[in-house]
Image (cartoon, helix red, strand yellow):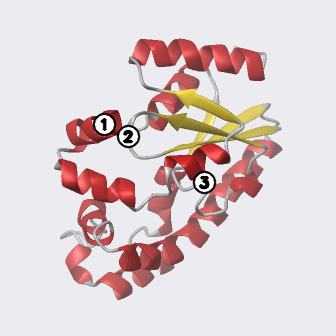
Amino acid sequence: MRTIGLTGGIGSGKSEVSRILCDIGVKVINADEVSHEAYRLGSSGWREVVGAFGEDILRKDGTINRSKLGDLVFSDSGKLDLLNSIVHPITRKLVYNRIDNARKKHEAVIVLEAAILIEANWSDMVDEVWVVTAPEQARLNRVHQKTGLDIESVKARIFNQISDAERNQKADILIDNSGSIDNLEVLVKKIWRKQIGIL
């Protein structure tokens, strides 16, 4: 089984690339969705996160308000490091289990979409790394339009991720998402045909 790690900075368009791949029938594991399980209500991860950041991050039903938690940690690198030290190991184990299940089902190719693929040292779980890139201004605008966050808050989130240069250095394939969605779709399908040979 061939395993591709798909990553990119916030607003780069990695989720769009995932959507395109899903549309052509590729099995995609979304690490962000998996991470929700890492601190689901009542789990050990939930208890650790609440213990570290307090009950103010909880909704009325007891679940963790990811938006409120995000506002808290993305403005403080120390708090972000603390959250990552709790959530990343749990998420890694859950992701590995999904990759292993896909292998048992004899999937030919799977894609692991993970924003933290490189900084969390998850590259050892994949055979190759594909990085989605886009100009910073485009990324700022996309995240602002999608989330409603002000530009300074978006900049803070970009700043708290590794740099594009660090990410690109680890890439086997770079996917330039500086154009339209249609252009991205054409590019992704072209890369997939060339690298994988099936579509």
Q: Are marks 1 and 3 in contact (CB under 8 Å)?
A: no
Instruction: Note whether residue 59 is visible.
Output: yes
Element type at mark 1: helix
Q: Nearer the viewer, mark 2 or mark 1?
A: 1
Question: Pointers 3 and 2 in contact (CB under 8 A)?
Answer: no
In primary-sequence order, the first of circles 3 and 2 is: 2
Relative vertical location of residue 178 with respect to residue 2 in this rendering, above or below: above
Q: Which residue is mark 2?
A: 11
Q: Whole-percent x and y of residue 115?
A: 51, 50
Image point (30%, 36%), residue name: 137
Query: Circle 3 sits in a helix, a strand or a loop, which is it?
Result: loop
Q: Quadrant of the N terminus?
A: top right
Q: Amino acid at mark 3?
A: Leu
Q: Name the amino acid type tagged 2.
A: Gly
Q: Position of residue 131 (x, y in %)?
A: 59, 38
Q: Earlier in the sequence, mark 1 or mark 3?
A: 3
Q: Is residue 151 left or right of residue 175?
A: left
- Per the image, the residue denoted by label 3 is 117
Q: Quadrant of residue 130?
A: top right
Q: Is residue 106 left or right of residue 102?
A: right
Circle 2: element type: loop
Image quadrant holding the C terminus, namely: top right
Residue in the foreground of this view, choosing between 11 and 20 = 11
Residue visible at 44% across and 60% down in the picture:
36
Task: Determine which residue is flagged by label 1.
Answer: 137
Q: CA distance from mark 3 to mark 2?
A: 16 Å
Residue 63 position in % (x across, y down) = 30, 68
- Viewed as shown, does residue 107 lie left or right of 173? right
Sequence-first disc among 2 and 1: 2
User: Nearest the camera: 20 or 44?
Assistant: 20
